[in-house]
Image: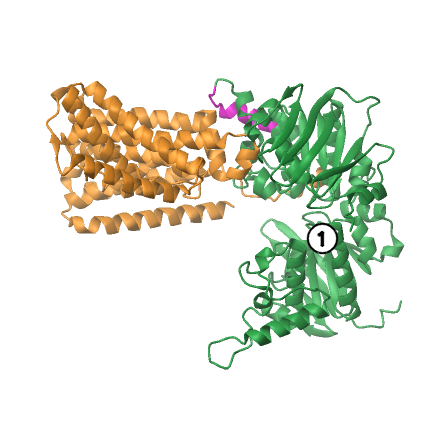
Chain colours: A green, B orange
């Protein structure tokens, strides 16, 4: 092995970190070599975030040693980490929305102007421009940050880190909110940074990325380092086994019906001010219908229009044989469910209990008299917790404390309680670990087998191809094409969804 | 599946719910205040004084109970005091001109309810933040009332009508009975109806509530209308108790009502709190002010003490809630 001769840029030896009742990190060692992309893999709660926080000085390790270029160092604060050239690109960005790109990059370190107390505006813009050029981001540094897209903000974050002489970048699911094209740009930037000798710690839930980008993979489970491997030496299935410690069905459980049932949803010529026009979609009972396309192609807007969350300009939506229009309360009473993309902000009341969240959509169904019976609510919630195998100490637990996969089950559970017939999923597996993913798919499969139907938005084309009976592909607010089960391949989805010049 | 269940964080599971713990502390505070006052002053424990405290607390409670529902939805109704004044003046005029207390009472309730409904329309249809909408409404109502009364005072109402505010039944003041009735109704409404549950859900996350199929706008309209109607009810009791109505009677009512809601443990961020807590809040506020009167502390100190209690109560709530999470 060639790099055994090379001294690691940063090495962590036997790091442990405990919180009351939890051992977040247990004797974890980790070496990062110059110019490599080191993938950090593990289910939610495996210790990735804790390790990342120890690395950047946000947490102090209870035990263990740090070595920087072979020398023993201490990381007890974020300042220590910064001194060593470690920078974290967080999922939630830390940019100031109303300042421009240059101001954000040099925030707190602005070059002084000639008059005391002023800032040398010309220098700050020139410096920023030079910096953006080096990372290959072609944009005017005087653009205000809140007008930028997620991907562009990420680029600014990276530029900011580079300007602070960061040699180690920690990225936490950086592609989670990026479109395919933006992801390509990010990957190109990562390649460029690598060539400059910058090392990257990369946390991801996406198998494809792990193999496309990683030079080395460290797998964590239950706070322990399970193994360190090279992508060439493992298969995705082996990695999944390491992560979950058991065999997981990666083939996406789905029992396709021989013949789809009657039409449940029919959308005719739907046009909405949110940017979709002339949408024609049909969903039958027993089907999972995919809604694909790039981020921003109007998929979420279609879902929201059907559910009544956004106003509709023209067109008709027929559900269960009768036309439907109005606010979400109408749609939900008729039997339509929306499982929104951002479950924390749109799907759940995070500070309320699991039980409260589970019954909130079913109140009218459970208590037709209008009188609420807490014990009956509790029983309903307990039943759903068992049925969906939601991992929670009790229905009284605050829902915000559950893992992503279990939170998603609560959102689905509330619509089960309401007796929904059509489930519209918007990115149902985003931020959910592998084990919970296959459980969610098994659940969707069971729902449609029992006569419900699902419309599923996903950026994970593999998932669409494996799970859906057929799919619509959107492009620029319109349905660009329809793919039957036989035509449903990643290539076809990409081809239909691509922008033409 | 057993692997996944390990993910859930092990948390100290308390026997009592968070609401119950907060309520327990508050009842303890009430007892403590009573004990201290009983030691310091002989007349505190006299029946007359205790009934007086309850009657005072009931006036604050009527306004504060409706307000509690608004605050539970993460809103605020700053117009309640001004609403009381307008409703009292209009109800008083109706009683004077028609001679019918019943008609007057209905008019007062209706006036309060309509004002509340207008607040609700501003908040839902016009999407004006409730703080601003009801602040504007406060001025509008004050303007209307001053113009309508033109400096006059209404006084001298039928004896039967005056019984509502100052009469007794089986040795207890009638407002105390009303207090118990509305405490019961308010608690049942908030805890035991699906509308109440939906109000909590709206306060906890309005976006998620709407996407969960709750008719958010209709519930908000209801909540503001109830808050207004409760102000209308308070106006009747004021009118009956004072036996007079002036344009400025509402000016010292809004802030104590908000204080009672906050002392009672309802969060201004919505989704947390109870109507019973607000009753305790009104009781604590009244007890402290009553005690200061009995101990001959200058009335000038009362706002300062109220402010300190509000800050203290909210701070303690935040601390216990943070510890629970």
Front-most of residues A259 and B298: A259
Q: Is residue A240 visible?
A: yes
Q: Quadrant of residue B256?
A: top left
Front-most of residues A129 and A117: A129
**The N terminus of chain B lies in which quarter of the figure?**
top right
Q: Which residue is mark 1?
A: A175
Q: In percent of the image, x 75 and y 70: which residue is there? A: A9
Q: Position of residue A401 (x, y in %)?
A: 58, 43
User: Is A382 in the magenta?
Assistant: yes
Q: Is residue A388 visible?
A: no
Task: Check the image and name the residue furthest to the bottom.
Answer: A114
Classify A257 as above or below B36. Answer: above
Task: Check the image and name the residue furthest to the left.
Answer: B156
SS at badge 1: loop
Q: Is residue A258 left or right of residue B321?
A: right
Q: Position of residue A484 (x, y in %)?
A: 83, 32
Classify A241 as above or below B193. Answer: below
Q: Main secondary structure of the magenta part?
A: helix
Q: In percent of the image, x 51 and y 39: which residue is there? A: B205
Front-most of residues A428 and B39: A428
User: Is A40 in the magenta?
Assistant: no
Q: Quadrant of residue A410?
A: top right
Q: Is residue B294 left or right of residue A218?
A: left
Chain letter for mark 1: A
Q: Which residues are magenta?
A: A370-383
Classify B274 as above or below A183. Answer: above
Q: Is residue A360 left or right of residue A53?
A: left
Front-most of residues B136 and A481: A481
Q: Position of residue A473 (x, y in %)?
A: 76, 38
């Amino acid at each position: 092995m060639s790099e055994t001769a090379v001294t690691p840029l940063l090495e962590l030896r036997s790091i442990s970190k405990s919180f009351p009742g939890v051992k977040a990190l247990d004797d974890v060692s980790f070496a990062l070599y110059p110019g490599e992309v080191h993938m950090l893999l593990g289910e939610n709660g495996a210790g990735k975030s804790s390790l990342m926080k120890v690395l950047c000085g946000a947490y102090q390790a209870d035990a263990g040693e740090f070595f920087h270029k072979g020398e023993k160092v201490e990381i007890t604060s974020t300042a220590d980490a910064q001194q060593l050239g470690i920078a974290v690109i967080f999922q939630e960005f830390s940019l100031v929305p109303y300042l421009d790109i240059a101001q954000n990059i040099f925030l707190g370190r602005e070059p002084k102007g000639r008059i005391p107390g002023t800032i040398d505006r010309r220098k700050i813009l020139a410096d920023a421009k030079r910096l953006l050029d080096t990372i290959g981001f072609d944009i005017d540094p005087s653009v205000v940050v809140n007008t930028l897209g997620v991907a562009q903000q990420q680029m600014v974050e990276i530029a900011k880190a580079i300007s602070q002489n960061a040699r180690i970048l920690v990225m936490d699911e950086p592609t989670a909110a990026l479109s395919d094209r933006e992801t390509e740009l990010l990957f190109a930037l990562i390649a460029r940074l690598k060539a400059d000798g910058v090392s990257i710690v990369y946390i991801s839930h996406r198998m494809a990325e792990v193999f496309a980008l990683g030079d080395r993979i460290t797998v964590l489970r239950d706070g322990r380092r399970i193994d360190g491997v090279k992508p060439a030496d493992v298969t995705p299935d082996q990695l999944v086994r390491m992560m979950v410690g058991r065999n997981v069905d990666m083939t996406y459980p789905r029992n396709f019906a021989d013949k789809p049932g009657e039409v449940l949803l029919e959308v005719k010529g739907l046009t909405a001010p949110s940017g979709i026009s002339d949408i024609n979609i049909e969903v039958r009972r027993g089907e999972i219908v995919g809604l694909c396309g790039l981020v921003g192609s109007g998929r979420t807007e279609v879902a929201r229009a059907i559910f009544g969350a956004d106003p509709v300009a023209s067109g008709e939506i027929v559900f269960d044989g009768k036309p439907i229009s109005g606010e979400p309360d109408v749609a939900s009473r008729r039997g339509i469910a929306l499982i929104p993309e951002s479950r924390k902000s749109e799907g759940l009341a995070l500070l309320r209990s699991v039980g409260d969240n589970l019954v909130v959509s079913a109140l009218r169904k459970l208590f037709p008299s209008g009188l609420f019976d807490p014990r009956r609510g509790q029983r309903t919630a307990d039943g759903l917790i068992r049925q969906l195998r939601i991992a929670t100490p009790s229905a009284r637990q605050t829902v915000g404390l559950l893992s992503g996969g279990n939170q998603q089950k609560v959102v689905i559970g509330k619509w089960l309680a309401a007796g929904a017939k059509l489930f519209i999923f918007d990115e149902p597996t985003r931020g959910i670990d592998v084990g919970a993913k296959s459980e969610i798919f098994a659940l969707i499969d069971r729902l449609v087998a029992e006569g419900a139907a699902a419309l599923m938005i996903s950026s994970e084309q593999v998932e669409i191809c494996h799970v859906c009976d057929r799919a619509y592909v959107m492009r620029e607010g319109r349905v660009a094409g329809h793919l039957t089960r036989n035509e449903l391949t990643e290539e076809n989805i990409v081809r239909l969804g691509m922008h033409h010049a | 599946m057993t692997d996944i269940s390990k993910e859930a964080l092990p948390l100290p599971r308390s026997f009592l719910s968070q609401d119950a713990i907060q309520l327990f502390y508050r009842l303890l505070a009430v007892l403590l205040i009573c004990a201290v006052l009983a030691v310091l002053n002989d007349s505190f424990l006299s029946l007359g004084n205790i009934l007086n405290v309850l009657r005072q607390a009931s006036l604050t409670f009527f306004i504060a109970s409706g307000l509690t529902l608004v605050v539970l939805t993460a809103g605020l109704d700053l117009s309640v005091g001004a609403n009381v004044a307008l409703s009292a003046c209009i109800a008083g005029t109706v009683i004077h001109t028609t001679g019918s207390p019943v008609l007057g009472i209905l008019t007062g309730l209706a006036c309060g309810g309509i004002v509340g409904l207008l607040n609700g329309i501003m908040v839902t249809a016009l999407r004006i933040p409730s703080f601003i909408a009801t602040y504007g409404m406060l001025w509008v109502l004050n303007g209307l009332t001053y113009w309508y009364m033109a400096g006059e005072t209404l006084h001298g109402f039928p004896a039967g009508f005056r019984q509502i505010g100052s009469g007794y039944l089986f040795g207890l003041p009638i407002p105390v009975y009303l207090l118990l009735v509305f405490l019961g109704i308010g608690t049942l409404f908030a805890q035991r109806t699906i509308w109440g549950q939906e109000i909590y859900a709206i306060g906890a996350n309005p976006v998620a509530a709407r996407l969960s199929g709750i008719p958010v706008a209709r519930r908000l309209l209801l909540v503001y209308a109830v808050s207004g109607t409760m102000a209308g009810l308070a106006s009747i009791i004021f009118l009956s108790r004072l036996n007079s109505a002036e344009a400025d009677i509402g000016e010292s009512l809004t802030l104590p009502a908000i204080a009672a809601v906050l002392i009672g443990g309802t969060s201004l961020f919505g989704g947390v709190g109870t109507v019973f807590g607000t009753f305790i809040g009104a009781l604590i506020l009244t007890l402290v002010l009553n005690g200061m009167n009995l101990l001959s502390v200058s009335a000038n100190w009362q706002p300062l003490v109220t402010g300190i209690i509000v800050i203290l109560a909210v701070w303690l709530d935040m601390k216990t809630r943070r510890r629970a999470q």
